[in-house]
Structures are given as structure tokens and as C-alpha cells.
Image (spheres, grey):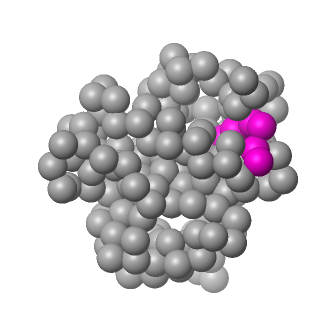
Amino acid sequence: METVRLAQATDAPTIAELQLSNWQRTHPAIAQRLNREDVQSQWAQAITLQEAGGRVLVCESDGALVGVAAIEFEQEIGHLSLLEVAPEFRRQLFGSRLLNAVADIALKAGCLQLRTWLNQDQQEGKLFLESIGWGATGATRTVSTETDEIGTPELTDHQIELTTSLAT
């Protein structure tokens, strides 16, 4: 049985594991620099502070966490900051279920629009969002990490913005 629900603090370790596992495939240079305990702690904090301006949702299949979505609210705009589904559960509507729940929560929070940023090389994610009505705004940005103290080069991602309307 599949369910989508608000994340609980006890979900933080599994969410961190899912994110890190997916990012090893999609963002290997970033995943390599992340500390598992720090990621888990950040998720626990985000879950604890959900009412302050965002929500973390999880999708389960037969009791196993298979997807996560995070949204932040800024006036009439909901910012989808993360959508991850375990690879073996993709193309089975879990991402769509999460996004439908995100849209419902965003509408209740007064949002009229959802936005997200994707790395330009995330074609699979872009195609998925476009297939359910999202579109590129034409806006782009470059996000860089800082160089560390031993001179490790910074990581730079070129991103595109996608959006969808929640107006009925």
C-alpha cells in the first residue's frame, strides 16, 4: 500500500540515506563532500521546524520509505527544494503522488505557484516535471560551493528554473 504523509523526526535517517544514495548517482561530487550525520541532523531539524514555513513529505510503499519531497513557502510561491524517489520505484507514480501532496499543501498555505531549480544536466527530472505540466521560465542561475582551506576547487552547477501554476 502506498501512502504520502508528513515526515516525522524518526524518518530523518532514512531520508538522509535516500538523498545521499540518489546524489551519489546524480551529484557525485557533492555527495562525496557530505557527511551522513550532518545530512541526517539537517533533515531532523527541517522536519521539526515544518510549521515555520515549509513541509517535508515522504512516500511509503508497504511501509518502506521510497520518496521524499521538501517545500518552502514564500508568500504566494512554494519552492520545491527537493524531490527524490528511490531508482527502483521510479516510473510507478510515487513522484507524482508526492507532487500532488505538495500542491495540496502549498494551496492550503496560500501559494499560487510552485517553482524549483534543476541542474541543467538533470534531463530525467526536467522531462518528468514537464510531463506533468511544469515549464521552464527561462531563468538560469549558477550555484557554487566555496573552496575549502586546502584549495579543493569549488563545485559549480548551472541551473534552470521550472514552474507550475496552482491557480484553478
Residue 35 in view (yes/no): no
Where does residue 148 sit, x and y in percent of width and height? 62, 76
Q: Residue at x 24, y 37 (%)?
A: 89
Q: Quadrant of residue 16?
A: bottom left
Q: Residue furthest left?
A: 62
Depth check, front residue: 84 or 58: 58
- Please report the residue visible at 44 percent of the width from the left and 60 percent of the height from the top: 6
On screen, residue 120 above or below 26: above
> Residue 47: x, y in percent?
50, 72
Q: Which residues are magenta?
A: 110-117
Position in image of residue 86 (x %, y %): 29, 45
Compared with 24, 163 (above or below) is: above
Query: Where the C terminus falls, by quadrant?
Result: top right
What is the x, y in percent for residue 15? Answer: 36, 63
Horizontally, residue 124 falls left or right of residue 73, namely left
State the residue at coordinates (21%, 38%). Answer: 88
Tell me what residue is drawn at x 63 percent, y 82 percent: 149
Residue 123 lies left or right of residue 117; in this view the side is: left
Residue closer to the observer: 83 or 55: 55
Q: Quadrant of the image for the N terminus?
A: top left
Q: Is residue 81 magenta?
A: no
